[in-house]
Amino acid sequence: MKSVREIFRNKEYLLDEPEVIKLVDYCEELQDEIVEFKFQKTNNKEFAMLDMLKEVIKGCNAIEKEQMEFERFGYEAPDYKATISNLKNYIYSRCREEKIWL
């Protein structure tokens, strides 16, 4: 599943349009419903947690890639590097503790 930033990467100015804001909100609601549906379908909290964790890791990787592109082309970008690394380390350590293999 692509993130909103990934979809509008080359045209971020469109994110300020009212219709796009409504569409993004609607997509977020649908994502929540999908997670809830998966949980109801399997009735397994571990499956839902794994799915959410995989999405977080995928999002972190996308932001890291975007950060590298900003650095490569010399644009000034927010420094997410430390935050993302800490988040990923936390998730991986918790998964090891709980014996959840991604």
Image (tube, rainbow, N blue to C red):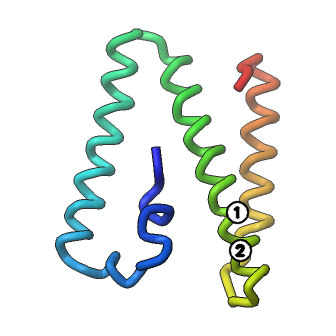
Question: Residue 88: horizontal and vertical position, in percent?
Answer: 75, 47
Total residue callouts: 2
Question: Residue 87: horizontal and vertical position, in percent?
Answer: 72, 51
Residue at the image position 48 percent from the left and 76 percent from the top: 10
Quarter-wise, where is residue 72 in the image?
bottom right
Question: Residue 102: horizontal and vertical position, in percent?
Answer: 70, 26
Q: Secondary structure at mark 1?
A: helix
Identify which amino acid the numbered label 1 is placed on: Lys
Residue under pointer 2: 69
User: Where is 14 relative to 39, above or below?
Assistant: below
Quarter-wise, where is residue 46 in the image?
top right
Task: Specify few, some or many for label 2: CA neighbours under 10 Å numbering under 14, 14-19, or 20 or more.
Answer: few
Identify which amino acid the numbered label 2 is placed on: Glu
For residue 81, the mark is: none
User: Where is 18 relative to 4, above or below?
Assistant: below
Question: Residue 27: horizontal and vertical position, in percent?
Answer: 29, 51
Residue at the image position 41 percent from the left and 79 percent from the top: 11
Residue at the image position 23 percent from the left and 61 percent from the top: 23
Residue at the image position 34 percent from the left and 39 percent from the top: 32
Answer whether labels 2 and 1 touch (C-beta < 8 Å).
yes
Q: Secondary structure at mark 2?
A: helix
User: Where is 63 relative to 39, above or below?
Assistant: below
Quarter-wise, where is residue 24 in the image?
bottom left
Residue under pointer 1: 65
- Marks 2 and 1 sit apart, C-alpha to C-alpha, by 6 Å
Q: Please state if 22 lies on the left or on the right of 91 as rendered.
A: left
Task: Specify few, some or many for label 1: CA neighbours under 10 Å numbering under 14, 14-19, or 20 or more.
Answer: few
